[in-house]
Image: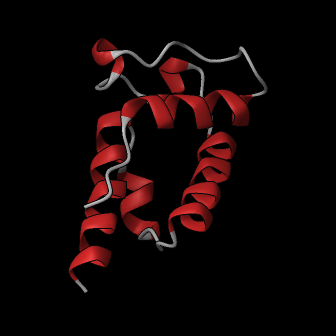
Amino acid sequence: MERFDRSELADLLREAAGGDEGAVLDEGALDTLFLDLGYDSLALLQVTGVIERDHDVVLDEEALAEAQTPRQYLDLVNGALAARAAA
């Protein structure tokens, strides 16, 4: 099963935020709010579009709105990837 990991999310967030902007996404930051890490909703929207395109998956918009931390976001993405693999 394909998994989306923290380093992939960190890379996409940095690209969406314009390079070096935003905080480092280490293990300790997984439960920190995206806004507190310096990532706004536009950055997350861009990241979501890239993930949906590159991984051929559709992420639930309501669940995305509730995913306020990197851990919640990763759980959402990996749940969608697992569901796609099981189909």
Q: How far from the left and from the top, in percent, is residue 40?
A: 62, 35
The image quadrant of residue 70 is: top left
**Residue occupying the point 27% across, 49% down:** 75
| Relative depth, front residue between 66 and 30 | 30
| Relative depth, front residue between 23 and 34 | 23
Left or right: 63 in relation to 44: left
**Residue occupying the point 36% across, 62% down:** 63
Q: How is the image coloured?
A: secondary structure
Left or right: 71 in relation to 52: left
9 to 48, vertically: above or below: above
31 to 48, vertically: above or below: above
Q: Quadrant of the N terminus?
A: bottom left
State the residue lying farthest toward the right.
18
State the residue lying farthest toward the bottom.
87
Q: Quadrant of the C terminus?
A: bottom left
Q: How far from the left and from the top, in percent, is residue 85?
A: 27, 75
Q: How far from the left and from the top, in percent, is residue 61?
A: 47, 68
The image quadrant of residue 52 is: bottom right
State the residue lying farthest toward the front.
1
**Residue occupying the point 49% across, 37% down:** 9
**Residue occupying the point 38% across, 32% down:** 6
Left or right: 29 in relation to 16: left
Number of marks in the rendered image: 0
77 to 43, vertically: above or below: below
The image quadrant of residue 68 is: top left
Q: How far from the left and from the top, in percent, is residue 7?
A: 45, 29
| Relative depth, front residue between 47 and 68 | 47
